[in-house]
Image (cartoon, rainbow, N blue to C red):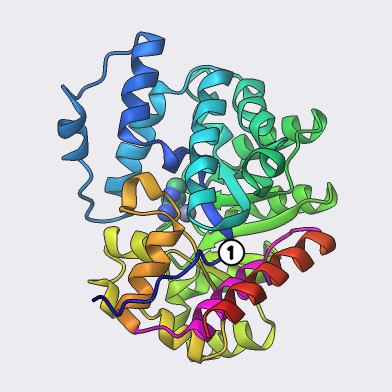
């Protein structure tokens, strides 16, 4: 008889999720057929064979190429609905998802189709999937800052339903310091600020994101471990780091999951949470990340609950929702004894 505990789902908030990174191969083929786009892959198997990455850029090349199938508002809505359905089954009860509007504008997809497609589904996510949601517009750091500022101005002018902005795409050589005006514009509009930093780039990009962009949290932040003084600061100021373990393995920031520093980060008192980043590309959703971490590091119920509590505390959820989410985690924790 198996002695493995049967665990009910750990409720958590997902704070680092690119909605375009949830585009599963099956949906890529479905949308291509619907939009009359011919794909450069004969079948699902050939597409799946491309999901071997050596670094961030090799992933980004496929991520942007696959976005070509997203043409209409309905495409964005279908992708968002598919993610929420899967996330609900993964235990996600609150999500703050990023969307890359620039990547779609550059392909000729109007801003309104992209934003409305995602936002229309988010509007009823709590009733339909039991997941409260926020939307973050992420800007591409390997494109000119002026282009990002123009898109943000349009989002603000159209009162787009976004809670904040983010910064993503190719990190090395594209430091946060180039985006000071963009982040000032966002703060002046009352938006929250996050940025990818220290995923592949050096630890001083994390410092720049904090000191120059005044971000509320850091996406990834893995490379903070190169600078003990920075770790002390992140612990002292309780700066959240949204960690994506499977992503770090698949993009070769760490060799294997067993080499991932998450347990040390937790032990150091850092506010780390577990996230899936681009789950369709990296081999798993949040539940897969948690399960593999638990099995690899023998994480205790207390440690798993701490990771989930961190995710809620680092979120932009409203106070009443935060209280509900924390209560769900405490019920889960009590059921583990
Ligand atoms: N992991 C990641 N890093 C940077 N930009 C991204 N865009 C989508 N996923 C990303
Ligand atoms: Zn990311």
Task: Look at the picture and state if 297 lies above or below 79.
Answer: below
> Given the current orientation, which residue lies at the most extreme front position?
1
Note whether residue 179 is visible: yes
Q: Residue visible at 49% across and 91% down?
A: 267
Quarter residue 15 falls in: bottom right
Residue toward you, 166 or 134: 134
Quadrant location of the N terminus in the rendered image: bottom left
Say which residue label 1 marks. Answer: 12
Residue 94 pos. (x, y %) = 64, 55
Quarter residue 40 falls in: top left
Q: Is the stretch drawn in magenta largely helix, strand or loop?
A: helix
The region drawn magenta spans 298-318
Residue 164 pos. (x, y %) = 71, 50
Q: Residue visible at 42% across and 57% down?
A: 173
Q: Is 307 within the magenta? A: yes
Residue toward you, 12 or 99: 12
Q: Is mark 1 within 8 Å of ligand 2?
A: no
Task: Look at the picture and state if 66 lies above or below 237.
Answer: above
Note whether residue 226 is visible: no
Q: Secondary structure at mark 1?
A: strand
Q: Residue visible at 49% across and 51% down?
A: 89
- Left/right of residue 226 with respect to residue 256 in the rendered view: right
- Left/right of residue 3 with respect to residue 157 in the rendered view: left
Question: Label 1 crowding class (10 Å Cα cut-off): few <14, some 14-19, many 20+?
Answer: many
Task: Look at the picture and state if 70 lies above or below 334.
Answer: above
Residue toward you, 243 or 94: 94
Q: Residue visible at 20% across and 49% down?
A: 52
Q: Is 335 within the magenta? A: no
- Left/right of residue 282 with respect to residue 44 in the rendered view: right
Residue 36 pos. (x, y %) = 35, 8
């Amino acid at each position: 008889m198996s002695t493995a505990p049967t665990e009910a789902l750990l409720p958590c908030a997902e704070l680092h999720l690119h909605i375009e990174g949830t585009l599963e191969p099956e949906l890529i083929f479905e949308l291509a057929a619907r939009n009359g786009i011919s794909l450069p892959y004969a079948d699902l198997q050939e597409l799946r064979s491309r999901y071997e990455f050596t670094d961030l850029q090799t992933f980004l090349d496929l991520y942007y190429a696959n976005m070509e199938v997203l043409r209409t508002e309905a495409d964005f809505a279908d992708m968002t609905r598919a993610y929420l359905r899967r996330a609900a089954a993964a235990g996600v009860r609150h999500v703050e998802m990023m969307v890359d509007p620039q990547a779609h504008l550059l392909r000729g997809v109007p801003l309104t189709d992209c934003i409305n497609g995602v936002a229309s589904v988010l509007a009823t996510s709590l009733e339909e999937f039991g997941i409260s949601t926020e939307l973050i517009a992420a800007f591409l750091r390997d494109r000119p800052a002026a282009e990002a500022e123009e898109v943000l101005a349009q989002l603000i002018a159209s009162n787009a339903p976004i809670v904040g902005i983010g910064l993503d795409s190719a990190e090395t050589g594209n430091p946060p310091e180039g985006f000071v005006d963009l982040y000032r514009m966002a703060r002046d509009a009352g938006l929250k600020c996050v940025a990818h930093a220290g995923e592949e780039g050096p630890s001083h990009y994390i410092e720049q994101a904090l000191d120059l962009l005044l971000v509320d949290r850091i996406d990834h932040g893995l490379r903070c471990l190169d600078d003990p003084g920075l770790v002390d600061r992140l612990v002292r100021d309780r700066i959240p780091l949204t960690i994506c373990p499977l992503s770090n393995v698949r993009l070769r920031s760490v060799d294997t999951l067993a080499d991932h520093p998450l347990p040390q980060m937790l032990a150091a008192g850092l506010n780390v949470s577990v996230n899936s980043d681009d789950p369709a590309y990296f081999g798993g959703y949040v539940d897969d990340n948690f399960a593999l971490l638990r099995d690899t590091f023998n994480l205790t119920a207390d440690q798993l609950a701490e990771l989930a509590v961190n995710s809620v505390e680092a979120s932009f959820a409203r106070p009443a929702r935060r209280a509900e989410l924390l209560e769900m985690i405490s019920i889960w924790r009590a059921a583990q004894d």
